[in-house]
Amino acid sequence: MSKVSFSVNGEVRDLELDTRTTLLDALREHLHLTGTKKGCDHGQCGACTVIVDGRRINACLSLAVMHEGDAITTVEGLGSPENLHPMQAAFIKHDGFQCGYCTPGQICSSVAVLEEIKAGIPSHVTADLTAASQVTPEEIRERMSGNICRCGAYSNILDAITEVAERQA
Ligand code: FES
Ligand code: FES
């Protein structure tokens, strides 16, 4: 067992955990924040994506005790039903889901993707590494490729992200 303290959605949380506990299980089983989903538990689907210190990670591939002092944002911390994050609202408007199981991960990833593009972080499909990154459909598809949707809501997810990116621009 080991103690760990990190903030989740702005609230400091102190836990004592088996050192083998993943961040995903700490969030879901210990803090009862079940918005973050367990799809594969093997880093293959992206359903468990959360934002840690501004970077998106697969919570199933990370041990909770590695996150001492970190600031973690889950889908619950992005917005509330009364006050949705613009990305959450855009997913609803564009019908960017069917069963919804992948959706929290898709939304956390989408929010982080737009920040990555804004910060000039290139992707595998960025042609010109010296130019400011563009929010193109190709860029969004590549950057979202770690988030799998079994329902196949991809085109609507792309529409939602594009709309938020255009509004931000
Ligand atoms: S549950 Fe973490 S990537 Fe699938
Ligand atoms: S909405 Fe069902 S898996 Fe994506």
Image (tube, helix red, strand yellow):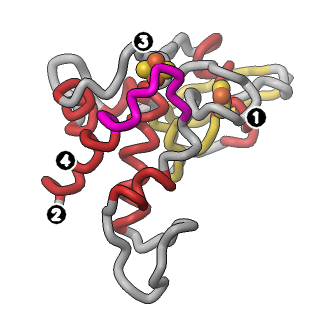
How crowded pointer 3 is (Cα within 10 Å; few <14, some 14-19, many 20+) is rated as: few
**Would you say the residues marked 3 and 1 are in contact, meaning their CB atoms lie under 8 Å apart?**
no
Q: Which mark is residue 99?
A: 3
Could you tell me how far apart the alpha carbons at marks 1 and 2 are, in whole angstroms?
Answer: 36 Å
Q: Secondary structure at mark 1?
A: loop
The foreground one among 51 and 144 is 144
Which three-letter amino acid code belongs to the residue tagged 3? Cys
Which of marks 1 and 4 precedes in the sequence?
Answer: 1
Could you tell me how far apart the alpha carbons at marks 3 and 4 are, in whole angstroms?
Answer: 22 Å
Question: Residue 158 lies in what quarter of the image?
Answer: top left
**Would you say the residues marked 4 and 2 are in contact, meaning their CB atoms lie under 8 Å apart?**
no
Question: Residue 81 lies in what quarter of the image?
Answer: top left
**Would you say the residues marked 3 and 4 are in contact, meaning their CB atoms lie under 8 Å apart?**
no
State the predominant SS element of the stretch in magenta: loop
Which numbered mark, 3 or 1, is in the foreground of this view? Answer: 3
In this rendering, would 50 be left or right of 21? Answer: left
